[in-house]
Image (cartoon, coloured by chain):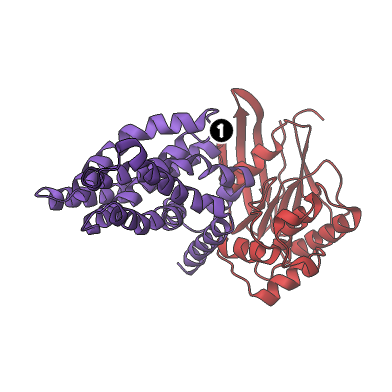
Amino acid sequence: MPTASVLSPTPPLLILQRVGQSRGGRPLFDGVDLALHPGQLLWVQGANGSGKTSLLRMICGLSAPRAGRVHVGQSLLYVGHKPGLKDQLSVIEQLRSSAALAGRPCSEPEALAALAPVGLDEAAGLRLAQLSEGQRRRAALAQLWLPQVASLWVLDEPLAALDSAMADRLAQRLDRHAEEGGSAVFTSHQALPLKRSVRNLRLGRL
Amino acid sequence: MGAALQAAAAITRREWSGTLRQPAEWLTPLAFVVGVALMFPLGLGPEPARLRELAPGLLWIAALLASLLSLPRLFAADLADGSLEQWWLSPLPRPLAVALKLAVHWALSGLPLVLLAPLLALAFGVEDPLPLALSLLLGTPALALLGGLGAALVLHARAGAGLLALLLLPLQVPVLVFGTAAANGGANADSALLLLGAWLAVLLALAPWATAAALSLMLD
């Protein structure tokens, strides 16, 4: 039974109370208790099929838990395996559209500034269909560098298809987000080169 | 409220731009109706009086079948690329997100048919194509709303296109009956148009909610 609990004076951004989930009648995990406070990062680990993505989707409210309760304190940003990229849109159109869709619109200069850290500022006018898988991943992650961003980030395999330089920049961004009072839940099969300490939640057998 | 409006504008813009940049999506129904209309004289014979009499009903059937063409892909791409999840996480109520998607779909696939069909009717010698245009103006949004619900229900089905047609054709019967009665003119045309409008109002009130519920089930 995976459990994690930390006492903190600040109200948690995420609370999981004895949460359980199943898929196709097969239990994935049970009794997950967790309170994630501002400034904390949570690394969800587990083998393929252990329910990492299911847990993240449940946190976002995209699926209902089989048991228990999920409470999200403030705004949330989800970058999943399939982050809603439209091949017909340009990189900058996609970024501005994603931001507006989340109710946090950004200007063109702000979008260009967010594309610079992911190395796509010079490709801002290119259609997403013209990008490689790694570049598409960067385009999806560029939202994290926008000025108005959610407090709780939920990132599913953010390192997938990224090179080590981009992984370093992502880790720096996560560190800064936590310093600024934000939180993040992420899954990954590799460790992120983070400076801050990270809480771990292990699902299933590793 | 401001955030919801921003999200609504974002969905509308990205659906509009995305669809316009795929000409096959919105040109196919138009080309289909023109192609079917060109076959009328071949199948029915070239007598002008007969073509004039049958044209409104036949154009309505062509419009109905054309509306089925793009439906299997209506939500499939949004499910595959994760857009549906992003809509669901936006501050916009889910039925409103669905309604906006369907509105853009209708504006780019149904509205051009409303404009094209009267021209085709004129070509067949119909003297007053206005009843046909009005009936399609009320009927094609109803077809889009029904189509959206059907497309959501068969999203995970393997033979989705065939199943969708089987599911939708019975539901589309009232639209076709009222639509053709209104398009043909005559004593009952006004009543048929009112009934078509009433049916559209019912669908506007219910279909986005039902479609959003079906899509939520597909996502869960």
Q: Is residue A198 left or right of residue B155?
A: right
Q: How many marks?
A: 1
Using the image, determine if residue A12 lies above or below residue A108: above
Most foreground residue, B123 or B157: B123
Q: Amino acid at mark 1?
A: Ala
Most foreground residue, B58 or A126: B58
Q: Position of residue A60 (x, y in %)?
A: 60, 48
Q: Residue at x 64, y 57 (%)?
A: A88
Most foreground residue, B64 or B156: B64
Q: Is residue B27 left or right of residue B186?
A: right
Q: Which residue is mark 1?
A: A67
Q: Name the outermost residue toward the top.
A: A25
Using the image, determine if residue A144 lies above or below residue A78: below
Q: Colour of chain A?
A: red
Q: Position of residue B45 (x, y in %)?
A: 30, 38
| Residue B217 visible in the displayed image | yes
Chain letter of mark 1 equals: A
Q: Which chain is purple?
A: B
Q: Position of residue A132 (x, y in %)?
A: 79, 52
In the picture, the quarter occupied by the N terminus of chain B is bottom left
Q: Is residue A132 left or right of residue B202?
A: right
Q: Residue at x 86, y 55 (%)?
A: A167
- Secondary structure category for the residue under label 1: strand
Q: Name the outermost residue toward the left.
A: B187
